[in-house]
Image (cartoon, rainbow, N blue to C red):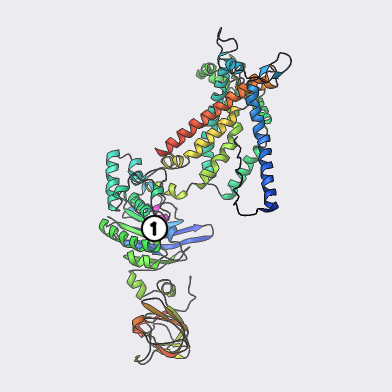
Amino acid sequence: MPDLVLSDIRKDFGAFRAVDRVDLTFAHGELTALLGPSGCGKTTLLRMIAGLEEPSGGTIRLGETDLTGTPPHARKFGMVFQNFALFPHLNVADNVCYALTIAGTPTARARARAGELLDLVQLADFGQRRIGELSGGQRQRVAIARALAQEPEVFLLDEPMSALDAKLREEMQVELRLLQQRLKITTIVVTHDQREAMTMADRIVVMSQGRCEQVGSPQEIYHRPANGFVASFIGRANFMSGRVRNGAVQVAGWTLQAVPAPAFIDGSQVTLALRPEKARLGADLPVGNRLPATVTFLRDVGATRDIHLDTPAGPMVVEEVTDRGTGLHVGAQTQVYLPPDALHLFPAEPVAA
Amino acid sequence: MSVETADPPMAPPDVDRGPGLSGYFMVRIAFCVAVAALCLLPFLMVIAISFGEKVEGAGWHFAFDLTNYRRFFVGADWPNSTSTLYLQKLGWSIYYAVIASVIAVVSAFPFTYFLTRLTRKAQTLWLVFLLSSLSLSEVFIVMGWDILLSARSGLPMVFQETGLTQWLKDMGWFDTLRDWGLASPRNVKFKTSVFATVLTMSYLVWPYAVILLYPALSRLDPSLIEAARTMGARPWTVIRTVVIPSVKLALIGTVLLLFVFLLGTYVAVTVFAAPAQQTLAVSIYEAVRGATLNAPFGSAQAVVLLVTAVILLVIGQKLSTAGGKG
């Protein structure tokens, strides 16, 4: 089946630009997560793909077919809504075969298909239940089964886990991913939860203020963030500001090496980002790339411990595995090592939220 | 119609309630008595009087006499002869009220549906306008429609002057209108007719229909409609399979409420309905205040009208809950 291609897609609400010149290709059979803070335009983008919003500019194509002006009922894209949008006046089976019923499929065949789909989402015995009798997780499964009934070419999910409690959410993320891999259906999930995106997605599109900040695999996005926004939004990061000098970075009077060496001209202001789990504390630290630090706070969170530090470059958090305890206490003087290959450099700019 | 008679609050046995609380209790008792006196008493009086006896030239006195009810169902002269005059009036009451309330709801539904899709500000303006139109009295509205539909000043004259009447005659549709009682040999005629009566009655309750349907339609989750659209439903299919079933209870409830309200229509019926097609409400008024002056018989008619309304409400309720399970 063909890829879904968005070219130069824009959406304006009055003077507000919700989606700004987005170019994306959704490869067949892949699960892509649109990830970003609320108001970044990810849901608007998804709704344009579904046909529920009309783009202010740009085109949406499925292979050779231009779908930009096609109404939603003619697109054959299944969608799961944030609140699931199940029809309260129909029972579970009738909800699932809604698409087939209105398309005029013979009742017996529609029923059989509903049965298969309910089986697929492990709700085989729930066909005759009313929607009001279902739990949140069951409703979500019904919504997924219903969206799959018309064998959609693209499967869209708008914040599908946000109505579920934390434990169920993690189970459903794994389950949905397994289902998607089994059906090999092109899937786009909107989420603001980076763990959710990393659990499920082949590819993550990080969005902010209507623009795509970075597109890549979960590992790429985490380990090689393209800019300060991605580094701060995906996982945690310590930020420092510095100035490039002779292929190294001056931070608060200390010289730090970065690998690869910074490709900035001498004297330019840069922002450095470092994941808390990459920094190291204590004795036997490699030579160089060290800053003196004072422990200001310790936060035990089970398997790991956050050590809050005060350094010449500003406050910093280091995450270490608890059983590798360094025996630090609040007020202790220590040194923090910043591995050169873990320092990410970006042009200095305010970190957008 | 029903009066909530509050149970006396249960007093814990070992707590001294003090003068303040018992004063509050007395106020509640007094309030219940006042409500009972104001709401229940006139109503009970009507029931009592309906069994009363008319005294020729001197009003009526209390009795327990079923004559009035017999007169209503089989005629005063029964068993010598049977008259269903008042049953027919009841029939007209129900007929007008059912048709007018259904027309009002069927036409108000699409209006309200599109109203809930407008901006908040536009919705408020429309609702304020509709609410203010409710301040117009029935007399005022009927007067307006009377002028609009009368032969010399209203629509029939417009039909005549614009040549529409001639066109209808040329097309051969004029005879159909005559069959329906909507034309005299020379021109279209709307007074008196069932058409004019029902039209005016549905106009009377139309703003109520919008206001009663509005909450259900504005609460309708837009994502239900969007979900249906992504599943291949065209706009009309969405309305048929999602919107109407979702607000079905509100639709039935509105029809029932407007129906009961319209059972009592007086002015519109006296102006627009033919004498042989007048309703029980008109007959009740005439018995109580008008030409016939027979309060016990008027009361009996009122009781029958009330019982009919209750029976139809119960049937409607049963139908809507039965439909809700299907």
Q: Residue at x 64, y 33 (%)?
A: B40
On screen, residue B187 above or below B223: above
Task: Look at the image and give the residue range highlighted in magenta.
Answer: A46-51
Above or below, A264 against B78 in this view is below
Residue highlighted by disc 1 = A160
A49 falls in the magenta region:
yes
Q: Nearer the viewer, residue A14 or B254?
A: B254
The numbered mark 1 sits on a residue in which chain?
Answer: A
Q: Is residue A269 visible?
A: no
Place of residue A272 in the rendered image (x, y in percent of width and height, measured from the top left):
43, 81
Q: Position of residue A317 (x, y in %)?
A: 43, 81
Left or right: residue B245 versus residue B79 is: left
Q: Position of residue A168 (x, y in %)?
A: 36, 61
Query: What's under tag 1, amino acid-wise?
Result: Pro
Residue B267 position (above or below residue B78): below
Q: Is residue B74 above or below residue A24?
A: above
Residue situated in front as seen by the camera: B141 or A333: A333
Image quarter where the C terminus of chain B lies is top left
Magenta highlight on residue A92: no
* Residue, far top: B80
Q: Main secondary structure of the magenta part?
A: helix
